[in-house]
Image: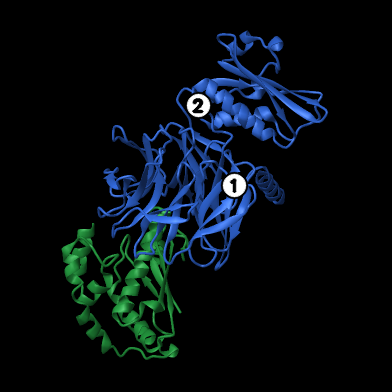
Chain colours: A green, B blue
Amino acid sequence: MRAMNIGKATALALTVVWAAGCSTTNTTDTDTMGSDATPTTTTQAVSDSSMSGTSMADIKNLATVFYFDFDQTQVKAEAVQALRGHAKYLVANPSASVVLEGHADERGTREYNMALGERRAQAIARVLTVNGVSSSQIELVSFGEEKPVVMGHNDSSWAQNRRVELKY
Amino acid sequence: MQRTLCFIFLFFFSVLARAELTVEITQGVDQPTPVAVVPFALNGVQALPEDVAQVVSDDLYRSGMFKIMPRENMLSFPSDRNSLFFRDWRISGSDFIVIGQIKETEGQLTVAFELYDVLKEERILGEEIKANRTNLRAVGHYISDKVFEALTGVRGAFSTRIVYVTAKQLAASKHRYRLMLADSDGHNPRTILESKEPILSPAWSRDGTKLAYVSFESGRPAVYIQYLATGKREKVQSFRGLNGAPAWSPDGKQLALVLSKDGNPEIYVLDLQQRRLTRVTHHFGIDTEPSWSPDGQSLIFTSDRGGQPQIYSIYLPTRDVTRLTFEGQYNARGRLTQDGRFLAMVHQSNGSFHIAVQDLRTGRVDLLTETFMDESPTIAPNGSIILYATQEGVRGVLSAVSLDGRVKFRLPSSDGDVREPAWSPFQ
């Protein structure tokens, strides 16, 4: 399964590969270690992003909820642009801070999902930090499967519940 | 129409008043042992708040191992050896019979019961128990334990208790979570903690006097210990990140738990007296859901170090890690029976999550449930029954299954979403 993740990851843009990463900085898989060597490219690509400014008003239209695939902790490509906008704001406002709340769908055991929610929040945090945000500005809280936004035992409910909410 | 509604309401509230959880047998053993439990005679006693013989009948029925003779089919209600005619009971098909009487002297109740083998016409056991009007259900469970052990050879667990969590949505973004304590049959439910934020992973200390659990009441997860007798509680761990999955060591001196303060979820052991924290696992994967082996020498835990969640064991003196589960893509939240032989767990197959049991001696895995979102298995202290959480519609309910899969029963709840059961040790 991990091998599959990596296959998928390498198929995506370098930015996303970096953003997705793995749950932690070290991993036994050398392929992933290899992809860790690309952050500079990512950061450069980010710095010319002009989609948002540096005041609260500039970020109010940015997405604050980011969704994930089942049992996955990879940040999706479409989330990266909004996250860069949040990063730009946080870099410009070092006293501002965010809480990243990680969530899982109801499938699987509760404590395992607690860990999964944290991994997702970490993946989002990694996108922010490679874009220059200080880790002291970021707090992670996982709620696992305990706070679904939608009740219901079906794919669409689960898809909406697998998320990280970014809160200022 | 109105009358029907009224009736439904009345029925609903009477159920509420009786117990929050009620038991329904959904499946039993193929050839249950026929037993008659005769209503206990009241000798000079005013009406009692509980029908002790009914408590015993219900307990034995709930075990799935007995067929209980309906009272209306009884030709007589003997209460002592002299009024007991074995032939009558043999003809009506009972192999065993429980009789009893309750006396009152100066406000003190005495409950006397006897168990007879109808075929051999022999007394198996009997006892007199001091009681009062408030503990008659407990007396009933005590009698059930004695009868169960005499007839099956397995210690009864009817006198034990359970805790579980209920969740109720009160408004769009307003929830109420409750940690509940009840008798093992679901009676006498009482709230021991209420919060607007999630509560999970309740765990009993082995002496049955304390609980550890995770509460988000501060907005972040923290592990708490609560004393049942006094309600006194203390926060034991609240590091940055995860603080979860507490599990008491068999000697009660240590608490295994999960912390992600070092970057990812790892298992730690907290010495409760010295407050010393020792990290037990070292892996970049998820390590969580620790549970102690009965000898306290090992912890079993869930890890995705192999790519998917599987259950591992770590032998604490050497820190040697052994993988225990190999069947299927997802095995998690293991719990061992008291003899250490069987591993109950959550097992995924065909997209559904079921309770499975693995015989650690032979490696054989049996699926015990066939519903679709079964989780949080907790084993009765006598190893006979696994209680677990499942879904009925969009509501969580508790169900139970015997370790051999032959007996199943459900404990439907009338109050919100029920989850996270934990069965107490013997007390």
Total count of labels: 2
Of pointers 2 and 1, the one earlier in the residue sequence: 2
Q: Position of residue B76 (x, y in %)?
A: 70, 16
Q: Nearer the viewer, residue B288 or A12?
A: B288
Vertically, is B197 above or below B15?
A: below
What residue type is disc 2 on? Answer: Met
- Name the residue beneath numbered marker 2: B65
Any part of residue A11 in sight: no
Q: Position of residue B366 (x, y in %)?
A: 34, 36
Provide the chain ID for the residue under circle 2.
B
Residue A159 located left or right of residue B128 = left
> In the image, which disc is placed on residue B181?
1
> In the image, which disc is placed on residue A129?
none
Label 2, residues with CA under 10 Å away: few <14, some 14-19, many ≥20: many
What SS does tag 1 mark?
strand
Spatial CA span between label 2 and label 1: 26 Å
What residue type is disc 1 on? Answer: Leu
